[in-house]
Image: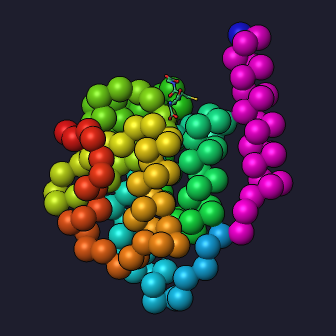
Amino acid sequence: MILKLLREGLGRLVMFFDWMTRPKPMQRAPEQQRLVEEQLKGMKLYQLKACPFCIKTRRALHRLNLPIETRDVQRGSPWRKELEQGGGRIQVPCLRIESDGQDVWMYESGDIIRFLEQRFGASADNVQSNSQSGSSSSEQS
Ligand SMILES: N[C@@H](CCC(=O)N[C@@H](CS)C(=O)NCC(=O)O)C(=O)O
């Protein structure tokens, strides 16, 4: 109980610190941003608000200007069951990527951030076809 409260408190503190120190979002030409957002429709981030690895991942989303839908997996949430059934385990963050009618469930904040950097970062070609969207991931269902 005390441990849970401590973890929650610490998580909120990290959230506040993150909010205070957020980097500026990357800017794209309006048409390019629209194309990026089109590709993001096939991606969902399963997460918890106060999880430090999720905060790190959301920070990268903010920096890369990627408004990906987030799905909170707190106990009792239907997203929790969906994550467990689709991805195979309850661990967050997890990025679900729809690719060629298949779902790729990418775990590990470092892998998720690397994938998004390569796909949408400053040196990426932002206008890829959807069929290329999950090419660097390891887990499929
Ligand atoms: N190495 C992983 C660590 C992720 C992790 O430990 N996430 C915790 C939450 S902070 C988790 O999902 N724990 C399982 C649970 O809460 O049931 C990463 O970088 O993404």
What is the count of numbered marks?
0
Asked whether residue 43 appears in the rendered view, the answer is yes
Report the magenta stretch's main SS. helix
* x 52%, y 72%: residue: 122
Residue 12 locus on image (x, y percent): 76, 36
Residue 119 locus on image (x, y percent): 40, 65
* x 76%, y 11%: residue: 2
Asked whether residue 79 appears in the rendered view, the answer is no
Q: Is residue 4 magenta?
A: yes
Q: Nearer the viewer, residue 52 or 70?
A: 52
Q: Is residue 61 magenta?
A: no
Horizontal arrangement in the rendering, residue 44 relative to residue 121 (left or right): left
The answer to which image quadrant residue 140 occupies is top left
Q: Nearer the viewer, residue 79 or 47?
A: 47
Q: Which residues are magenta?
A: 2-24
Residue 93 locus on image (x, y percent): 49, 39
Horizontal arrangement in the rendering, residue 41 relative to residue 10 (left or right): left
* x 75%, y 19%: residue: 5
65 w.r.t. 55: above or below: below
The answer to which image quadrant residue 120 occupies is bottom left
* x 41%, y 27%: residue: 90
Q: Nearer the viewer, residue 48 or 122?
A: 122
In the picture as drawn, the residue positioned furthest to the left comes out as 101
Q: Nearer the viewer, residue 3 or 131?
A: 131
User: Which corner quadrant holds the C terminus?
Assistant: top left
The answer to which image quadrant residue 87 occupies is top left
Residue 81 locus on image (x, y percent): 36, 31
